[in-house]
């Protein structure tokens, strides 16, 4: 009989379960695909917040602190930054002089007082945003008028300045009253027919009024059409002008003849036109210097003196023996 073999004991290595092997491979793949978790400081640093140097002015300091606080609130809502780490994170974005100021300001405070964001914000306002600046902004909000501003520009400025008066900003009725009071008088009278409960609704009414005023009227449309037709007609005449000039030159008459100057055609016709040798000779013998020569009924041309049409003499000088085109005076 063959020798009897004992069953495999637990000390001997066993084969792994195929299900457990598949789960292990899946977990390894998911771990490799999972994005790298950044620390809160790295997440804030990658946002590339501007560094506050202390020379940005009152408005620049206010804008910087608002931007930082807004960023921290978003990160806190996502669970990336605790409220106790706000002050510590902000110090990474302070310049050398402003960092020294905060170190001196918070010296002697307890750790929980240093980490309190309200304490940092109050100290920052006291140092870089004085009360005089806030009072000036509040007065600007109270006396704000639309004047030449568009409706959207007036709305944005009114909304931005309202944060300097928290009591009025928290009262919708007072906000609507002040917004109405600052708009243009003609718009205010036109918008009273619409019932509005907030200044945002009144702003929508102003936009509709502004759009209707910017639309061209019927008379303006008609005038525009007339001008367009006149321009189109002028363009058509301009395109035909070279043809007229060409036919004008072919007829043997230059621009100087039409304007009263002395041209080649005047020489051929004996100077009977205004400005020709005939006229110049008549001016020298008592002719009217600036007047136009009279129209001759015999030759149907304008000239001074006796008409020599049909005679054998020269039309230019009156001498016998040559024609006007061969007259020495014309030459």
Image: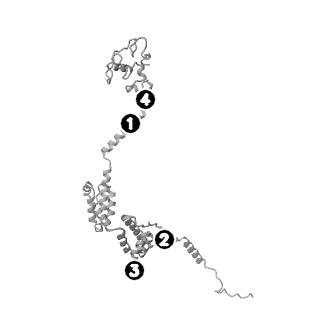
Give the Cα separation between the discs numbered 4 and 1. Answer: 17 Å
Comparing labels 1 and 2, the label whose residue is closer to the camera: 2
Q: Pick whichever of labels 3 and 1 is earlier in the sequence.
A: 3
Give the Cα separation between the discs numbered 1 and 2. Answer: 70 Å
Q: Which residue, given by chain and number where applicable, does mark 1 sit on?
A: 234
Q: Pick whichever of labels 4 and 3 is earlier in the sequence.
A: 3
Q: Quadrant of the N terminus?
A: bottom right
Residue at 30% over, 64% down: 136
The answer to whether residue 78 is visible is no
- Disc 3 is placed on an element classified as loop
Q: Are marks 4 and 3 in contact (CB under 8 Å)?
A: no
- Give the quadrant of residue 153: bottom left
Q: Position of residue 326 (x, y in %)?
A: 44, 16
Q: Which residue, given by chain and number where applicable, does mark 3 sit on?
A: 110
- Disc 1 is placed on an element classified as helix
> In this rendering, is residue 328 above or below 66?
above
Q: Are marks 4 and 1 in contact (CB under 8 Å)?
A: no
- Disc 2 is placed on an element classified as helix
Q: Which residue, given by chain and number where applicable, does mark 4 sit on?
A: 245
- Give the quadrant of residue 129: bottom left
> In this rendering, is residue 76 above or below 251?
below
């Amino acid at each position: 009989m063959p020798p009897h073999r004992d069953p495999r004991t637990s000390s001997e290595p066993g084969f792994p379960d195929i299900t457990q092997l598949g789960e292990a491979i899946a977990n390894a793949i998911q771990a490799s695909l999972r994005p790298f978790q950044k620390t809160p400081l790295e997440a804030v640093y990658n946002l590339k917040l501007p560094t506050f140097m202390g020379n940005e002015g009152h408005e620049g300091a206010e804008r910087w602190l608002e931007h930082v606080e807004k960023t921290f609130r978003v990160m806190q809502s996502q669970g990336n930054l605790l409220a106790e780490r706000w002050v510590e994170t902000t110090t990474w974005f302070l310049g050398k002089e402003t960092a020294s100021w905060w170190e001196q300001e918070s010296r002697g405070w307890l750790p929980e007082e240093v980490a309190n964001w309200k304490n940092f914000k109050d100290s920052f306002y006291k140092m870089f945003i004085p009360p005089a600046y806030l009072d000036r902004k509040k007065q600007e909000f109270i006396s704000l008028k639309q004047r030449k501003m568009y409706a959207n520009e007036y709305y944005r400025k009114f909304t931005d300045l309202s944060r300097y008066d928290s009591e009025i900003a928290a009262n919708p009725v007072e906000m609507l009253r002040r917004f109405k009071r600052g708009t243009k008088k003609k718009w205010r009278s036109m918008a009273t027919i619409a019932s509005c409960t907030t200044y945002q609704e009144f702003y929508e009414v102003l936009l509709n009024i502004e759009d209707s005023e910017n639309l061209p009227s019927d008379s303006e449309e008609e005038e525009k059409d007339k001008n367009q037709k006149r321009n189109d007609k002028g363009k058509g005449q301009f395109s035909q002008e070279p043809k007229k000039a060409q036919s004008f030159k072919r007829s043997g008459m230059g621009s100087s003849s039409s304007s009263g100057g002395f041209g080649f055609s005047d020489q051929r016709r004996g100077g009977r036109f205004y400005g020709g040798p005939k006229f110049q000779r008549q001016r020298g013998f008592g002719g009217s210097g600036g007047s136009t020569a009279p129209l001759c009924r015999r030759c149907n041309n304008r000239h001074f003196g006796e008409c020599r049409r049909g005679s054998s003499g020269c039309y230019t000088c009156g001498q016998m023996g040559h024609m006007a085109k061969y007259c020495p005076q014309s030459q």
